[in-house]
Every structure is written in structure tokens, then in C-alpha cells.
Amino acid sequence: MADLDAQDLNRVASSAYSDALQVIASVEPRIAEATRQELADQRGSLKLIASENYASPAVLLTMGTWFSDKYAEGTIGHRFYAGCQNVDTVEALAAEHARELFGAEYAYAQPHSGIDANLVAFWSILAHRVEGPWLEKAAKKNVNELTDADWEALRRELGDQRLLGMSLDAGGHLTHGFRPNISGKMFHQRQYGTDPTTGLLDYDALAAKAREFKPLVLVAGYSAYPRRVNFAKMREIADEVGATLMVDMAHFAGLVAGKVFTGDEDPVPHAHIVTTTTHKSLRGPRGGLVLATEEYAPSVDRGCPMVLGGPLSHVMAAKAVALAEARRPEFQTYAQQVADNAQSLAEGFVKRGADLVTGGTDNHLVLLDVSSFGLTGRQAESALLDAGVVTNRNSVPADPNGAWYTSGIRLGTPALTTRGFGHDEFDRVAELMVDVLSNTQPGTTKDGKPSKASYVLADGVADRVKDASAELLDKHPLYPGLELV
Ligand code: DSN
């Protein structure tokens, strides 16, 4: 198998998937049919969701096994269940690949998702910085030895800690201290934003806020900020105020793995703890991962039982496969192409007069402000979908339309780059999107009032764009050679 090229692998995967779908159909044919349809839909649309990708058949097939049936709470070699020797192998390999790929001192492959990874990180920081010293002072080995009164006092102290993270509308994530999210409730939180004129991070303003607020945790990283971050500066700010620097690199982990982000832009040498998902630009299975320095490793290793239950062993196996793929030289070529393609996409919009947050990009995503087309993000997202362009609406900084309707459309290049799209194709994608948006008018409610949701897409545009997209997609098939029978 190791000698098969991608085309041959897809051909071999054809029989695996075709047979698997027959097995599924023997129990619930509608699920088999939906699975076939999902492949057809993904093949036939321009996927520009910045957080999505197409994992390889090797990664996908790894998830469909009997590892799914095994409980394995605990850590490698120290499980609460018997018979975990193969799960130990899998988890150790996932951690080894992650450490080698990212140059991390320690890796923890158990989190099921990004929010799980972030919760593990938060509680590891609290355990290391608050609970540990508290127990030491009380000369206790663990919390079970505390009196009820001491336990209550420790709980109050754990609940009295501060977190500073990037605000959602500036491009941060829900889990970076957004008040409705658990991260905004378990910590006293403050948020930093971007410069209102440039849309860029203002490190001086951030440092001033950190000095005033003195957080225990400074969170860096983003879901919708189209620029690189200087993590060396972030670490300086964290050190000055005594904060732990946690970086959530879920969106750009592929660019770190692929050595596009190096030096000050690589979070791993600068942060105390780095979290990520494995399915976005990293192109693995849906899941989470935590990297840490030796100092934080023992507390991260307590992710289960601190935050997590049984790990998803089948997904950890797929993480190991995806991380092994990301260690290959061709992944670096892919990652560079992701960043180059984002530039092409941004330039394609700018030269056609569209308005981009920060004026461009230097990572994998572009944030298009659709208010210049007279549309909300919701209207733009829907009109684009009618034309076979899959995006997601997103707030822009200080968004007048709020987080539901929004004024932005977030676009990313990881998925279509996996299909083989390059500079010219992304320029054409920008052209097609501008065609849709400039031919869409805001609609009205049933009472004739202006609506933020309804829209009117001019006749013929959806078909015109779908035909043009089909030409691009046909030249770059998804899973070429994979045919279901
Ligand atoms: N839902 C992910 C994204 O789209 O960025 C983050 O959680």
C-alpha cells in the first residue's frame, strides 16, 4: 500500500467504501443513501468554509473500526479499563507524531474536539497555577484530602481567576472568553479586539489591557482573523503580567505543521500550552489535540478525568494517520499553496472592488465585508449557496448586524487547495462570487419591510455560476478514482 499513489489509493478505497455502504444499507439504507449523497454534494460544490477540509481515505477509513468499541479512560499505560494495549499503541503514536511534527515537548491526543482541548488547557492551567500551590500550602496530596471547608475555599479561588482573549467579532473564538460560552463564565473575562482603522491586532493596546487586567490566562489565536500573529510578542506580554500564554491554533495548525508559520509566527516555541483541532487546515479527523511544555505536561495529562471521559480511540488512530501524513514533505507544499491561494483569492476580490477586513490576508482565510454589496452576511451566504458556493457568514469587527445576520462572509482555501486548485482557479472563484453578490438584492419581509435574511438573486446567475464552477471542479475532482458502486 505504501507504494500506491493518491489515484491508486482512491481506486482501492472505492471497493472499501462500496462494500461498507452495502453493509450499512443492510441495516438502514437511508443512512447509506445520505452518505453517498454527501460525497456527491461535496464533489459538486465549491467548499470555501475556512474550517473545513477533505481528509484522505486513509484517515477516514481509520475511523470506521472496532477501536470505536473500546473504553480507555486514563493515560497511556495507566487505564481504568483492562485490555487497552492496542489503544496505548494508538495514543502513543498520535502523541509521538504530534510532538515530532510540531516540535512540542508534550502532546495529548485525547480531546474529542476543539472546545474539549481548550477546556483541558484551561483546567490544566488552573490545576498547575492555582490548585497545585494551594494543595502544597495545605500539605495535601490531592483534593480528596481536603476538609469540606478547605475544598470550598479552593473552589472559590479557582472560580476567581481571570482570562483575556480575543473578542468574537474581532475574529476570536467562542471559547476565548465569550460571555455566553463556559469560558466566559468560569473565568472573570476581558476581551481584546483589533484596531478600528486597520482591523489589525494592536499589541500595545493589548499589552496595556493585560497590564490593567492582570489575567492568569492570555489566549491567542483566532477563527476569523485573516492575518498572522506574532506569538513572541504575545509571550512577552504574558510574561510581563505573569499570565500563562495559551494559543488556540485550530485554524492555522496546518500552516504551522507545513512550516509556513515559523519563528515568531509559530506558537509552539512561545506558548506554554497550544491547542488545536485536527480537522481544519491540518486535514485530519474531527478531533482535538493539546501540546504543552514539560512544565504543564503533568496537568494536561490529567485531562481525563479532569475534563474528559473515555477517549475516542478510533479517532486517535486517525489523528496518528493524519499527523503522519502531515510529516511528509508534500504537506509543506500543500500548506504553502493554502497561503498562496488565500492571497490569490483576496487579490481577486480587491481588484474587483470588494471590501476585505484588513484589506487582505496572510494566512488561509479571507473575511469579505458584504455591506458594500448592500447585503447582510446571511443574505450573501444564502445567495452563494444557491449558486453552489458553500461559505459561512461571519461577524466583522463592530458588526452592525450582530452575530446572527452579520455583515461578513468568511472564506478559506484549505479544502479547495486539497482538490488541487491554484492561483488561477481562486481568481476565478473570486470572480464568480462577485458575480453572485453583485446580482443579489436584499429582500423584504411578508409585511414589505426591509429584511436581513431574504434576498433576490437575479435570474440565470445561479445556473451560470454553477456551470462555471463545474468546469473548475471537474478539472480537480475530489478523491479522483474513487467510484461508488
Ligand atoms: N466552528 C469552527 C469554525 O468554523 O471556525 C470553530 O469552532
Image: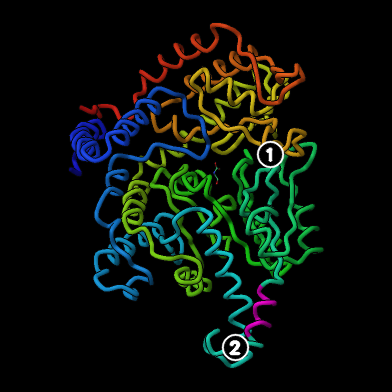
For the record, the magenta segment spans 151-158
Check the image and report above or below for 266 versus 437: below
Q: Does the stretch in magenta take in 239?
A: no
**Which residue lies at the image location 39% right of the left edge and 46% below the top edge?**
284
Residue drawn at x 61%, y 13% is 457
Give the percent coordinates (x, y) of residue 134: 63, 84
**Tag 1: amino acid:** Ala
Residue 438, position as x, y percentages in the image:
65, 14
In the rendered image of this protein, does residue 335 appear above or below residue 173? Answer: above
Name the main secondary structure of what is drawn in magenta.
Answer: helix
Residue at numbered disc 1: 403
Farthest residue in the top direction? 460
Pinpoint residue 356: horizontal percent, then vertical percent.
Answer: 67, 29
The quadrant the N terminus occupies is: top left
Q: Residue furthest bottom?
A: 139
Q: How many marks?
A: 2
Label 1, residues with CA under 10 Å away: few <14, some 14-19, many ≥20: some
Q: What residue is pinned by disc 2?
A: 136
Identify the image quadrant of residue 317.
bottom left
Q: Point out the tag, 1 or 2, that comes first from the N-terminus.
A: 2
Q: Is residue 133 above or below residue 472?
A: below
| Element under disc 2 | helix
